[in-house]
C-alpha cells in the first residue's frame, strides 16, 4: 500500500484524574466509526487512544487517596482500557504517558526544540492554578482562577520557556493556506483571533513538583504536562525510538490525518502543538477537528451537579450500537448536543427497532417463506414497475451522498440520508404488498414477488454496508443474515446497486433490534445510581475549594471538562436513599448541621481511633466522640472550626455519651478522615443548608 492509502486518527489522551464517562465515550466512538469506515474503504488505518498521566494534580490526588501517583494512574488507565474493550473500540494502540517509549520520545522532541534554539531559561513569579496547571496572567495573590474559580497560588520558579512568540505569523499563514486544518469554522475563527491577539512565550517546565518527565540535562525540572501530553501523537508511532521498525512506523503514519478533540482544548492542539512541530521541523497534522459538549438533559455535565453519566449504564442495558447510533445521529457534530436516557430509547425504538429492524426482518422472513431462503431473481422484463427503479436510483444517490457527508464529519446528516432510504423501502413494501402478490397464482405474480423482495433486500444490503461503521455489531449480524459472510472483508469503495448474489442462501434470520420497553429507562437510571460514588452530602457542603460550577477549562486533555480532583477517590459510604437514589429537600432539611468550635480535645483511653471533644455550637457546648484520633492530634484541634450534625440521637461509645457527629471526608482504602472546613471565616453556630 502506498502512503496515500494510510489514515492516522487520534483521540485526545484522557486525563486520569477523572474516571471514564460518556463524554470520553463520545469522542472515542466518533473516532472508532471513522476508523472502521476507513478500514472498510481499504485504508491502512492507525487509530490511537490513551491516557495522560502526569502533573501536579495527579500527584496530589494520589496523595489524597493514600497511594502513589503511578498506582493511581495504573488503576484509572486500566478503567479506560476496560471500558473501551467493552465498547468494542478498535484502537490500534493505547499509549500511556508514563510508558518508557513515550518518555523517550517526549525528551527527543524537547531536545530538538532546544537544538533549534526555541527553548530558553527564565524566571517566573505569578499566580498559578493547580487544578488547571496553568499560570494566570494578570492575577494577584488571592484571586480565583478565571477558568475554574479555585483560589490561585503564588509561585516563583525558574522555568524553561518555549519561544511561542516566534510562530504567530507562521501559524496564521498555515491556517490561511489550509482552510480545513481547523474544523469547524467557528473554532477556526476563534483560533485565528487568538493568534492575531499576539502570542507570548510559553513556560514549558515545572520545578515545584516531581510527577512528570524530567527535562533532558536538567532533571530538577519536569516537562509541562501539555508538551508531554501532546507529543504522544508522535511518540506512539515511534518518534525517538532507536528501533528501525519504529522509525519506519513514524515515517509511514506521521503526520496524523485527524486529531479529534473536544472544543475546550482547541488552543492546545491548533496553536501550541503545531508551533512545537514547526520548531522541531516535523510535519503538521492534516486536521484538528473539535466536537461540542454533551449536555445532560440540556445542562452541562459536571461533578458538582452530580449529573455525569457513565457509558456503561447505556451499553449494559441497550448495547453498544444503541449508544453509538444515538450519539452520531442525534448530535450535529461540532455543536453541543443533549443526552438523556429517554432520548436514547426514543431514537432506538424509532430508527432501529422500527425502521431498520422492520425492513430487515420482514424482507428476510418473506424471502425465507416464499423462496426457501434463496435471494430471488428480479425479472427486468416481465414484472417491472417504475417504483423498483425509484428505489434503485435512490439507493445509488444515497451511497454518493452518505459518503460525502460522512467524509465531512456530518454524521447526523449522513445517517439521516441513509434512513430516508430505509423509510422509502418500507413504504415501497407497503405499497407493493408482496404478501398479497404471494397469494396469487401464475408465473407473472411469482416474478413480481421476486422483484419486490430482491429490491428490498438489495436496498437493505446498501444501508447495512453504509451503517456498519456506526452499527458494527448489528450491521455484521444483518450482513450474515443476508448470506454475505464477514462484513469486515467487504470493500466499501466498491459499493453499488446490484451486487447481492442472486440465488444466494440467507443465513439464519433473527431479530436484531428487540424493542426497548418502558423499563429500559428505569434500568439505566438504576445502574447510574448504583454506580454513583455515594458522595457524602455531609462533606460536599463544607469541603475545601470547590467551585460553584465546574466549568470548561483549558489545560485538560479530556474531552469533557467535567471532573475534579477527588473523583477517583473511593466513595465513603452509601447514604440511605429512596429507590431512585434521591431524597427530597425536606429530608435534607431535617438534618441540622452547624458550625462548631473545638474547646477541648483528648484521647479516649483504650480506643486508638477515638477522641473526646467538647464542641461549642453557639447555643451550648456538646460532648462528641469522634473516630479521628489516627489523623488528628488532640492539641491541634483546639480552636478549630468544624461541621457538626447537631440533631443526631445521642449514642454511647466506650461508655461516653456522644451528642452529635463531626463531618469528615473519608479518603483512600483506609478511610482516613479529613475534617470539613471553610475557606472564609464563619461564626460559631451558623447553620449549614
Ligand atoms: Zn483553575
Image: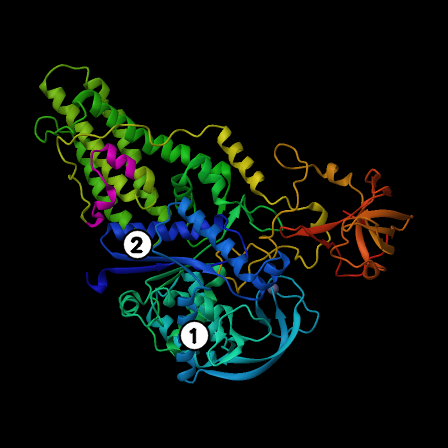
Q: Is residue 664 left or right of residue 81?
A: right
User: Would you name the residue on which mark 2 appears?
Assistant: 407
Residues drawn in magenta: 476-493
Q: Residue at x 63, y 66 (%)?
A: 145
Relative image position of residue 611 (x, y in whole percent): 81, 51
**Marks 2 and 1: which is nearer the front?**
1
Residue at the extreme front of the image, as rendered: 606
Main SS of residues in magenta: helix
The answer to whether 78 is drawn above or below residue 528 in the figure is below
The image quadrant that residue 592 belongs to is top right
Indicate which disc residue 107 carries.
Answer: 1
Q: How many marks?
A: 2
Label 1 sits on a secondary structure element that is: helix
Colour style of the rendered protein structure: rainbow
Q: Is residue 246 left or right of residue 337?
A: left
Measured Cα–Cα span from mark 2 to mark 1: 35 Å
Q: Residue at x 43, y 55 (%)?
A: 334
Q: Are marks 2 and 1 in contact (CB under 8 Å)?
A: no
Relative image position of residue 534 (x, y in whole percent): 63, 43
The answer to whether 228 is drawn above or below residue 481 in the figure is below
Which of 267/42 is in front? Answer: 42
Quarter of the image with the N terminus is bottom left
Q: Is residue 410 visible?
A: no
The image quadrant that residue 677 belongs to is bottom right
The answer to whether 528 is drawn above or below residue 667 in the figure is above
Which of 452/650 is in front? Answer: 650
Which of 465/335 is in front? Answer: 465
Label 2 sits on a secondary structure element that is: helix
Indicate which disc residue 379 carries.
Answer: none
The image quadrant that residue 525 belongs to is top right
Q: Which one is earlier in the sequence, the residue at label 2 or at label 1?
A: 1
Q: Is residue 92 highlighted in magenta?
A: no
Amino acid at each position: 500500500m502506498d502512503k496515500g492509502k494510510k489514515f492516522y486518527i487520534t483521540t485526545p489522551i484522557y486525563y486520569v484524574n477523572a474516571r471514564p464517562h460518556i463524554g470520553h465515550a463520545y469522542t472515542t466512538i466518533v473516532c472508532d466509526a471513522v476508523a472502521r469506515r476507513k478500514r472498510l474503504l481499504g485504508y491502512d488505518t492507525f487509530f490511537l487512544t490513551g491516557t495522560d498521566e502526569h502533573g501536579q494534580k495527579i500527584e496530589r490526588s494520589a496523595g489524597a487517596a493514600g497511594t502513589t501517583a503511578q498506582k493511581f494512574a495504573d488503576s484509572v488507565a486500566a478503567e479506560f482500557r476496560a471500558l473501551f474493550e467493552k465498547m468494542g473500540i478498535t484502537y490500534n494502540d493505547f499509549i500511556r504517558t508514563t510508558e518508557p517509549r513515550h518518555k523517550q520520545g517526549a525528551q527527543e522532541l524537547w531536545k530538538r526544540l532546544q537544538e533549534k534554539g526555541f527553548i530558553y531559561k527564565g524566571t517566573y513569579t505569578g499566580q498559578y492554578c493547580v487544578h488547571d496547571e496553568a499560570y494566570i496572567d494578570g492575577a494577584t495573590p488571592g484571586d480565583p482562577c478565571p477558568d475554574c474559580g479555585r483560589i490561585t497560588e503564588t509561585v516563583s520558579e525558574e522555568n524553561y520557556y518555549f519561544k511561542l512568540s516566534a510562530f504567530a505569523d507562521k501559524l496564521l499563514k498555515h491556517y490561511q493556506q489550509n482552510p480545513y486544518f481547523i474544523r469547524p469554522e467557528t473554532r477556526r475563527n476563534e483560533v485565528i483571533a487568538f493568534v492575531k491577539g499576539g502570542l507570548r512565550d510559553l513556560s514549558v517546565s515545572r520545578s515545584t513538583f516531581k510527577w512528570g518527565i524530567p527535562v533532558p540535562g536538567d532533571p530538577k525540572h519536569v516537562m509541562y504536562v501539555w508538551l508531554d501530553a501532546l507529543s504522544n501523537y508522535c511518540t506512539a508511532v515511534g518518534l525517538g525510538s532507536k528501533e528501525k521498525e519504529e522509525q519506519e512506523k513514524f515515517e509511514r503514519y506521521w503526520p496524523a490525518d485527524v486529531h479529534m478533540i473536544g472544543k475546550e482544548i482547541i488552543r492546545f492542539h491548533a496553536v501550541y502543538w503545531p508551533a512545537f512541530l514547526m520548531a522541531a521541523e516535523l510535519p503538521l497534522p492534516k486536521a484538528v477537528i473539535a466536537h461540542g459538549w454533551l449536555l445532560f438533559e440540556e445542562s452541562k455535565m459536571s461533578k458538582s451537579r452530580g449529573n455525569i453519566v457513565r457509558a456503561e449504564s447505556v451499553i449494559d442495558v441497550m448495547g453498544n450500537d444503541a449508544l453509538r447510533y444515538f450519539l452520531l445521529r442525534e448530535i450535529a457534530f461540532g455543536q453541543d448536543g443533549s443526552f438523556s436516557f429517554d432520548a436514547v430509547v426514543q431514537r432506538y425504538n424509532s430508527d432501529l427497532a422500527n425502521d431498520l429492524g422492520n425492513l430487515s426482518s420482514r424482507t428476510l422472513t418473506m424471502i425465507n417463506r416464499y423462496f426457501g431462503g434463496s435471494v430471488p431473481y428480479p425479472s427486468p422484463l416481465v414484472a417491472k414497475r417504475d417504483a423498483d427503479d425509484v428505489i434503485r436510483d435512490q439507493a445509488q444517490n444515497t451511497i454518493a451522498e452518505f459518503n460525502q457527508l460522512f467524509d465531512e464529519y456530518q454524521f447526523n446528516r449522513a445517517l439521516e440520508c441513509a434512513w430516508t432510504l430505509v423509510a422509502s423501502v418500507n413504504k415501497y413494501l407497503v405499497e407493493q404488498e408482496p404478501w398479497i402478490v404471494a397469494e396469487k397464482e401464475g408465473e407473472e405474480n411469482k416474478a413480481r414477488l421476486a422483484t419486490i423482495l430482491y429490491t428490498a433486500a438489495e436496498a437493505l444490503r446498501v444501508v447495512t454496508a453504509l451503517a456498519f461503521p456506526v452499527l458494527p455489531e448489528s450491521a455484521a449480524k444483518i450482513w450474515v443474515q443476508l448470506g454475505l459472510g464477514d462484513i469486515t472483508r467487504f470493500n466499501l469503495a466498491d459499493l453499488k446497486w446490484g451486487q447481492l448474489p442472486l440465488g444466494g442462501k440467507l443465513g439464519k434470520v433473527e431479530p436484531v433490534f428487540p424493542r426497548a420497553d418502558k423499563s429500559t429507562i428505569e434500568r439505566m437510571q438504576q445502574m447510574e445510581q448504583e454506580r454513583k460514588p455515594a458522595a457524602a452530602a455531609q462533606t460536599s457542603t463544607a469541603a475545601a475549594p470547590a467551585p460553584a460550577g465546574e466549568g470548561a477549562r483549558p489545560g485538560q486533555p479530556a474531552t469533557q471538562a467535567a471532573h475534579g480532583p477527588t473523583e477517583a477517590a473511593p466513595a465513603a459510604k452509601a447514604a440511605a436513599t429512596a429507590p431512585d437514589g434521591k431524597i427530597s429537600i425536606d429530608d435534607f432539611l431535617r438534618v441540622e448541621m452547624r458550625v462548631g468550635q473545638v474547646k477541648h480535645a483528648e484521647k479516649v483511653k483504650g480506643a486508638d481511633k477515638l477522641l473526646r471533644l467538647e464542641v461549642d455550637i453557639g447555643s451550648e457546648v456538646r460532648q462528641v466522640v469522634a473516630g479521628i484520633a489516627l489523623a488528628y492530634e488532640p492539641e491541634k484541634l483546639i480552636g478549630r472550626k468544624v461541621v457538626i450534625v447537631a440533631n443526631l440521637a445521642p449514642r454511647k461509645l466506650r461508655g461516653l455519651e456522644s451528642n452529635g457527629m463531626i463531618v469528615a471526608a473519608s479518603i483512600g482504602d483506609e478511610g482516613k478522615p479529613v475534617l470539613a472546613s471553610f475557606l472564609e471565616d464563619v461564626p460559631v453556630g451558623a447553620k449549614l443548608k
